[in-house]
Image (cartoon, rainbow, N blue to C red):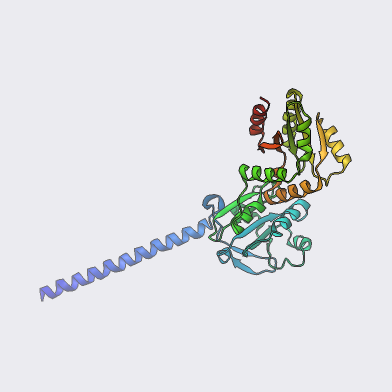
Amino acid sequence: MCTSIVNSRRRLLLAVLVAANILVAGYLLARRSGTAKAIGPLPLALTQSLPLIELKDDAGQAMQTSTLLGSPLFVQFVNPYVEPQIASFLRVRGQNLRRPISWVIITRDSREFRRRMPKDAGDLIVVEDNYERLSDLFNIPKCCEEWRLFDETGRLRGWAKYDEGDAVGSLLHLVNGDAPFSRDMLLATIIKISDDGLLEQLHSRAARSKRGKAVGVIFSQACTGCPEHYLIDLLRARASNDQGIAYLALLPNSFQASDADNFKTNLDISFDVERANPELSRRWSILDQTYGTRLINGTVIAVSQGKVVSIETELSETREMLRRFAQ
């Protein structure tokens, strides 16, 4: 009988311990669940991945961003009243992509954005609700709008301001597998342009120079307050000191002859400024649209004895390249 009582007490104690463990586990799970809700979705700045959140589009339909996984995703914050932002997005969207992707536009005025889009834009997910919160989650600065590119797993693969980054190049690299921008890629492209006879304006100046050398710079755009102004200062100084080397600035033929004259006068350029031939202008426009003005604009090309010998796109590297070229 004593043994029976002891065994009963042991079973009761074991049952109490099991119940207590279950209660503690449940409490801890509840605490963890409550903490997760308090923290909310993790922002892009912390995870470098797509924030897993609910979006409400301009038709009032709610969706989870997790449903967009499985294919690349392009997210752009857009001010629809800024024409270059609309043009930037249309240029990105107009690329010939080899597989489908999802497009999410986040804007303060979805109606105006829709009005600016072509009729075939029904696949766009346009979001106006919770703009400020989404800006924080996607790590968008207060000053300006930017774009974000995610792969099929939700991993961040590209980002920049709409007017500075090579959105098209990043998209084509991720979706189509095209080579990303690099100095070697640009050099190979310019050598091909030269071999096709499209740098004759530069080569002819080299042929007439005392040393058979010339330096050219190709601009898509430039202004007195832009970073390109520092490049022009450098080229102006080099042109004055590099005896026997010809210097030339080329603008796309979308510029008028008077634009080239004004460009030379306003920026106090001491060497010749010309409009590029139509085919060079066309190919340069493709490069600009593919890789972005920030990477392409102000490319400096050094030619000697009918050959392209070097190119640079960054100011510090250009300074060193010109120093070596003049030796």
Task: Residue 263: give x, y in percent of width and height.
Answer: 83, 36
In front: 83, or 245? 245
Percent across and percent down for residue 309 are 66, 36
Q: Position of residue 27 (x, y in %)?
A: 39, 63
Q: Residue at x 31, y 65 (%)?
A: 21
Q: Quadrant of residue 94?
A: bottom right
On the rendered image, what quadrant is the N terminus found in? Answer: bottom left
Residue 236 image point, x, y percent: 76, 28
Count of marks, rendered view? 0
32 or 49, nearer to the observer: 49
Residue 275 image-quadrant placement: top right
Q: Name the quadrant of the C terminus.
A: top right
Q: Residue 206, located in which quarter of the rendered image?
A: top right
In this rendering, the answer to whether 190 lies above or below 34 is: above
Furthest-right residue in this view: 258
The answer to whether residue 231 of the structure is visible from this angle is yes
